[in-house]
Amino acid sequence: MYIVFLLQLLIWSLFSLVEWRSAHDHFIFKALLFMMFMYVAFLLAFWFRLTKRQACWTTLLTIAIYFLCRQLFWAYRL
């Protein structure tokens, strides 16, 4: 489960990079992009033989940690 957690954080880091590259896109496209990355993260957890419930909770946890760290970074950057 620890490996899944780290790999999902890597996926969310890639999401951040792709979101930065598509800075001028409409909100609907960014939402679709987020849904695609969330689905890929869920599939990754499911591929590592986690149950659907564990995969869902792990994905939601990594999303929450990613957005929390992202907010803290932008709030306290130098």
Image (cartoon, rainbow, N blue to C red):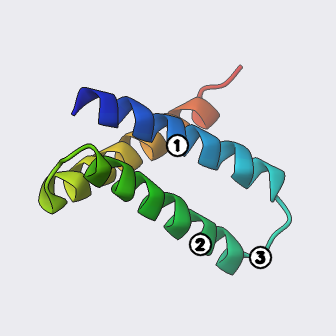
Q: Which residue is the site of mark 3?
A: 26
Instruction: Looking at the picture, tell me which residue is in the foreground, 33 or 67.
Output: 33
Q: In the rendered image of this protein, does residue 16 appear above or below residue 57?
A: above
Q: Residue at x 21, y 34 (%)?
A: 1
* Label 2–label 3 contact, CB within 8 A: no
Residue occupied by mark 2: 31
Image point (37%, 49%), residue name: 44
| 23, above or below 71, in the image | below
Give the CA distance from mark 2 to mark 3.
Answer: 9 Å
**Amino acid type, callout 1:** Ile
x and y percent of residue 38 in the render?
45, 60
Q: Residue furthest top?
A: 78
Residue 61 in percent (x, y) is at 29, 46
Q: Nearer the viewer, residue 43 or 24?
A: 43
Q: Which mark is residue 11?
A: 1
Residue depicted at 60% across the width and 74% down the height: 32
Q: Nearer the viewer, mark 1 or mark 3?
A: 1
* Quadrant where the C terminus is found in the figure: top right
Q: Is 34 on the left or on the right of 20, as rendered?
A: left
The first of marks 2 and 3 along the sequence is 3
